[in-house]
Image: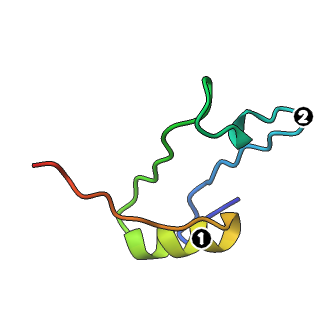
Amino acid sequence: MRSRAGRGRRVWEPKNHTGAQAIEEPGAMIWHEVDTRDHKRAAEFCCRVFGLEARKLESAG
């Protein structure tokens, strides 16, 4: 996959590995992060393509 800016995107396909569906159990994924300069477009892309919900984390400081 390529972004509109021509940058590559990497997407993992689980096939028979179901670990990504594990929630609140040992071995489950606990952190997903997107590092970008264009937060709005990245959030729109991820929500549209992957069916995710973008949420801003409040910092403790």
38 left or right, relative to 27: left
Nearer-the-camera pick, 47 or 23: 23
Rendering quarter of residue 36? bottom left
Rendering quarter of residue 19? top right
Mark 1 or 2 closer to N-term?
2
- Give the residue number, with chain letter if any, for mark 1: 47
Q: Residue 7: image x %, image y %? A: 56, 58
Q: Which mark is residue 16?
A: 2
Q: Residue 9: image x %, image y %? A: 62, 54
Q: Residue 1: image x %, image y %? A: 71, 59
**Kind of residue sitting beneath label 1:** Cys
Q: Is residue 61 above or below residue 39?
A: above
Distance in Å between CA atoms under marks 1 and 2? 24 Å
Q: Is residue 18 above or below residue 57?
A: above
Q: Is residue 39 above or below residue 32?
A: below
Which residue does the image show at 54% across and 76% down from the upper left?
44
User: Could you classify mark 1 by the number of other residues whose Cα lies within 10 Å: few (under 14), some (14-19), or many (20 or more)?
Assistant: few
Residue lying farthest front? 24
- Secondary structure beneath dot 2 equals loop
User: Could you classify mark 2 by the number of other residues whose Cα lies within 10 Å: few (under 14), some (14-19), or many (20 or more)?
Assistant: few
**Kind of residue sitting beneath label 2:** Asn
- Secondary structure beneath dot 1 equals helix
Nearer-the-camera pick, 5 or 61: 61
57 left or right, relative to 14: left
